[in-house]
Image (tube, rainbow, N blue to C red):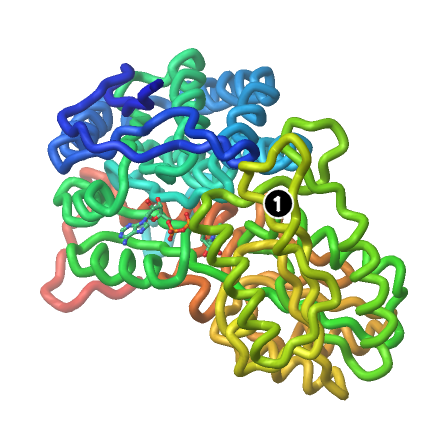
Amino acid sequence: MRTIEHWIGGTSTAGTSTRTAPIWNPATGEQRAQVLLAAPADVDSAVRSGLEAFDEWSQVSLSRRSTVLFAFRELVNANAEELAGLITDEHGKVLSDARGEVQRGLEVIEFACGIPHLLKGDYSDQVSTNIDTFSFREPLGVVAGITPFNFPAMVPMWMYPIAIACGNTFVLKPSERDPSPSLLVADLWQRAGLPDGVFNVVQGDKEAVDALLDHPDIAAVSFVGSTPIARYIHQRGSASGKRVQALGGAKNHAIVLPDADVDYSSEHLAAAAFGSAGERCMAISVAVAVGAAADPIVAAVTARANAVKVGAGRAPGSEMGPVITPASRTRIVDLIGTGEQQGGVLMTDGRGLVVPGHEGGFFVGPTVIDHVRTEMDVYRQEIFGPVLSVLRVDTVDDAIALVNANPYGNGTAIFTSSGEAARRFQRGVHVGMIGINVPVPVPMSYYSFGGWKDSLFGDKHVHGGEGVSFYTRAKVVTARWPHVEHPADASFHFPTSS
Ligand code: NAD
């Protein structure tokens, strides 16, 4: 059995712990490897490696840093196919989807290549007589990223390119379910000329996470994962004095108005609900049909759900792969059952799906549940599977109120041909990322990504300008270069300008 190790100080290492977790091939149900689960001593050695590297890396010129970033960008691009293959083999998502994930991560690296521009400070000449003021931003130190299984390449790339470009060193704790892409990335960083110790990978579970949260030499933590863990990370990390951004789960609603084009809306709804088997924090899991939109949209989206090509991620033509683990499959299947018991109408039911030749795979077929109500479990829980719940309301304002009553606020979308309704929606919803006829509105890297309410704890979103701000802190300098012949004119009152 292959054992997946840590990457500390520029080399692969087994560390001290012998605890392991299985890595599945979700398409076959077979175990393909095991991953080591770090002990606190392993976390400590990664942090120490980062601390030693920080002294040098934080002093490296902006030109040199951006040169390394450009080289890394070229290497990720050149190895995108290998990276996508690793994602598909451990996560299960189809290859085209994995390629898209790498592409969106690459865009953050490209953003970080512009770090000399992004770190420009302000300068004010003559704020007082013969006095100038200027500001600049400095890195924090060793920062950590703790990431979920569903985007094993992209979500870490939301973090480390910017953190490292800003002059920090990084300890990544990837998901223990699909850890291999992070090790390929570590190798690419080294080949790009990044000094050893600037980027470290510690494999692990709660034990490693807690050791990072409590470590006195970790300055900041970026987390992406489920809401209960995000809340915990924010509280424990903040309590030990760290800067924390913790992105949580989601229940993304798409509103469909009667004036929306039915073909367009149903195609996009199905892709947003069933793409990546619904294992996206920006997946649409709830369709809110307004008035007369309901019957046609339910019929069209059900027809599209029934036509989705479900298969192994590497099989040509597959549109949707398996879910991540047997436990995840069981949970999704059980939730569909509660949806039916609690009064939902199953328009199509993916529970019994078997993919020929992959009978052991963790497959659940696309499922559409109509007439869902807000008190039902399928509405209240984040299913994180290929299940679309449909709620019916009378007006666009009812739909907006429904979105706002939900505890999550990650993404939401509206399908309409009315600019007035779209504008009312974009201004009225309490949600961080909004799509207008765009169901998965993931912002480009030069904007920031983040939700509201239970979808984000902390005050900074990831990447874009907020990412640069999260990984740096400001200095403001007030400077005078006195003429020797001038009187000192010092005074004992509080400094005011003259
Ligand atoms: P998860 O919360 O189970 O795990 C995320 C990370 O936390 C992993 O690295 C894991 O090892 C660690 N972890 C798990 N349990 C822990 C515990 N008890 N104590 C400390 N650390 C722990 O999430 P997941 O199942 O890997 O990913 C799916 C979730 O992530 C979904 O809820 C999804 O919505 C969310 N997600 C959110 C975003 C976003 O941008 N808001 C993006 C992607 C995924």
* Quadrant of the rendering where the C terminus is positioned: bottom left
At a point 58% along the width and 27% down the height, the residue shown is 84
Q: Which residue is mark 1?
A: 276
At a point 63% along the width and 40% down the height, the residue shown is 321
In the displayed structure, would residue 436 be above or below residue 316?
below
Residue 175 left/right relative to 479: right
| Nearer to the camera, 250 or 428 | 250
At a point 73% along the width and 62% down the height, the residue shown is 348
- Crowding around mark 1 (Cα neighbors within 10 Å: few <14, some 14 to 19, many 20+) is many
Residue 474's x, y, as percent?
A: 32, 48
Residue 336's x, y, as percent?
A: 58, 65
Which quarter of the figure has residue 248? bottom left
Which quarter of the figure has residue 34? top left
Secondary element at image label 1: helix
Residue 403's x, y, as percent?
A: 60, 76
Three-letter amino acid code at the position of disc 1: Ser
